[in-house]
Amino acid sequence: MTTPARPDDVVRAQARAWRDDDPDPATQAEIDALLAADDVVALHDRFDERLQFGTAGLRGALGAGSNRMNRALVARATAGVAAWLRAEGCTGPVVLGRDARHGSAELEAEAAAVLAGAGFEVRVLPRPLPTPVLAYAVGHLGAVAGIMITASHNPPQDNGYKLYLGDGAQIAPPVDEAMSARIDAVGRLRDVPRSSAGVEVLDDAVLEAYLDAVVGLLRPGSSREVATVYTAMHGVGAPVVRAAFERAGFPAPHEVAAQVEPDPDFPTVNFPNPEEPGALDLALAEAATVGADLVVANDPDADRLAVAVPSRDAVGSGWRALSGDELGALLADHLLRQGGCTQDDVVVTTVVSSRLLQRMAEAAGVGYAEALTGFKWVVRAPAPGQRFVFGYEEALGYCAGDVVRDKDGVSAALLSAEVAAELLAEG
């Protein structure tokens, strides 16, 4: 239901109050310009509503106002999160990460300052890195929470704020509602304490541990001979995928040069989502040029993975992108064939995904569970005493083992390369 429009003078007053409490001179100036021009349409757009905090955190267009992503919104959200953590008796560190989108560094710095001002030790990843590295870092560092500044595969004008708790998984109800109430209770932002004490920028030790862990998902002694084309979709995945392939013993992937470096404007794609038509065109052209066996593509924060394979039936390029259900079944089959699984192990998918995984689980003698859409539910689906083997959702999200309690496009890329290499070795 649409929120009823409020009088223009009320919105003008709200804009002035928001500007006076805003910690960022840039967004203050944006509001001043709108007020000076008396652009009430733009003011209503920014202030009639507020971006709502939920299980997916926050996500929206960058800019000034309560209905935009900005330092003020991040400060308020983080102050509320800190208040909830204190009320729950959480006393450990909080780890922060960011992607390479517009504003990510500034939003991360704001969150760090507010957390430190609230008395928390803050650990910051050393540079823009994939979301699954942040999710891994929460458990690896024994953190009470993790915050990732990312809008994943949203359009260039967006940014976001994703929250993990100490179990390494994204928040789920009723925690989101309790945190939202704490956020609503935050008063003037000018009164929120900020500090740089206790903020530590990490070295690469966490990343190295993550790489060891994801490589450990592979089968020892399996074939590594596969020619792969990789695209980072202008995101942050390339250096980590490159390092993971090298550590695992795969040949270096052929990288799509025009998309390998982070670029928050995503100039070569209409929409930085590997599911979108045309998003893989440059990668498929590269694959035809180098004679690749496999194409793998991450979204900008590298938590999702798309895969394309040569196909005589494909029209035009000679390649066909696998659906999420197809790749999910292939990866599940691969992991279940490794052996050692028992009836106490479980594979998981969502209620809107294929039922093939259920039949595969029955054939393998392992447990099967269905979850609501979203990895916050997928990773929480196992019953007490069950071991999580694999989970996926059809929207190109995959999770193997307990390395990361969220979807992970880096480990999925490694496993996909292993499947292809083994099939090639078998002819």
Image: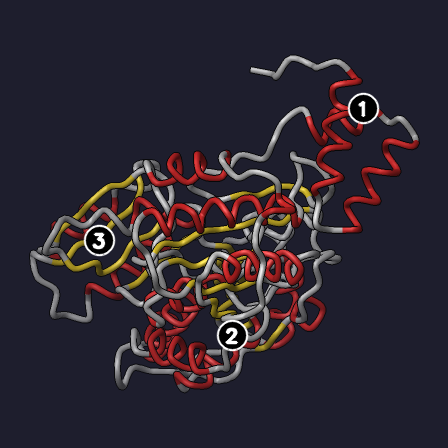
Q: Residue furthest right?
A: 37
Q: How far separated are the C-alphas under marks 3 and 2? A: 37 Å
Q: Which residue is mark 2?
A: 200
Q: How far separated are the C-alphas under marks 1 and 3? A: 50 Å
- The residue under the point 60% across, 47% down is 191
24 left or right of 77 in image = right
Q: Earlier in the sequence, mark 2 or mark 1?
A: 1
Dot 1 amino acid type: Val
- The residue under the point 63% across, 27% down is 49
Of badges 3 and 2, nearer the viewer stands: 2
- The residue under the point 62% across, 49% down is 159
Q: Residue 41, which numbered label?
A: 1
Residue 340 coordinates in the image, percent (x, y): 11, 70
Residue 320 coordinates in the image, percent (x, y): 51, 55
Question: Dot 1: what SS?
Answer: helix
Colour scheme used in the picture?
secondary structure
Dot 3 amino acid type: Val
Of badges 1 and 3, nearer the viewer stands: 1
Q: Which residue is mark 3?
A: 347
Q: Quadrant of the C terminus?
A: bottom left
Question: Dot 3: what SS?
Answer: strand
Of badges 2 and 1, nearer the viewer stands: 2
